[in-house]
Image (cartoon, rainbow, N blue to C red):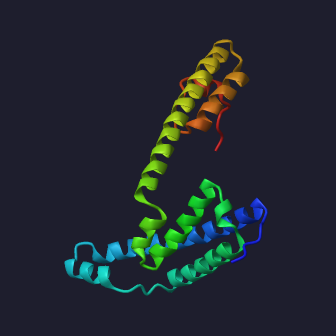
Amino acid sequence: AFKPLFMEDVAEQKLARMEQKRDELQTELDNEKERTRKLVVGVAVAATRAGSRARTNPAIDALAEELAALIEEFETEVDLDKLSKVDDLRFRLTKATLANAQHRYAEVQTLVPVEEAVAEFQTAKKKIEHAETQTNRAIETNQVVGDGFYGLREWGKALACYARILELRPHRCIVGLHKVAPPVVY
């Protein structure tokens, strides 16, 4: 089949539309799981029935139908071989979500192998750890500099440093902040 070349932003727009629909579908699937869980908690007989019953959720069926149409349109109009690694994963996640909604669970494992899920987790974990280290360094730096301004009685500069800390860690208690912060009026 002929797949015309589109600018990258067209593919991005289509991927974004599919992701939005995928998120809606995933939310409905999660809601259905939660409803089912509530129904079967503590009732073994109900659990057996709930696990084997056919889906009767029209919202999920409608979203799945819309997503299937978006996927078909994307496959027709975009050269899949030219997708970046990230966009390829976004597209496969969309197809896998649809497969879950349609009870085609084995297909999910083909579209997104567990090894890829583990690799994505490990990458994210490393980035979080790096971000946490960087955040802590920024907090320490602003704390020390803010304390210096506080000692010099340069309240505005101290407050600016402390405000940056609170932006990074909203629940952090900064000793002495009450002395430089304007009074709160309710």
Q: Residue 186 at what x, y percent from top left?
A: 64, 44
Hey, which quadrant is residue 35 in on the image? bottom left
Viewer-closest of 73 and 44:
73
Whether 7 is drawn above or below 44: the answer is above
| Quadrant position of the N terminus in the picture | bottom right
Q: Residue 54 at what x, y percent from top left?
A: 38, 86
Question: Which residue appears at 59% of the width and 77% of the height?
Answer: 67
Viewer-closest of 16 and 119:
119
Q: Residue 59 at what x, y percent from top left?
A: 53, 82
Relative to residue 147, is residue 26 drawn left or right? left
Whether 91 is drawn above or below 44: the answer is above
Question: Which residue appears at 45% of the width and 45% of the height?
Answer: 122
Question: Which residue appears at 72% of the width and 76% of the height?
Answer: 2
Viewer-closest of 68 and 1:
1
Number of numbered labels in the structure image:
0
Q: Residue 135 at what x, y percent from top left?
A: 56, 32
Q: Is residue 27 visible?
A: no
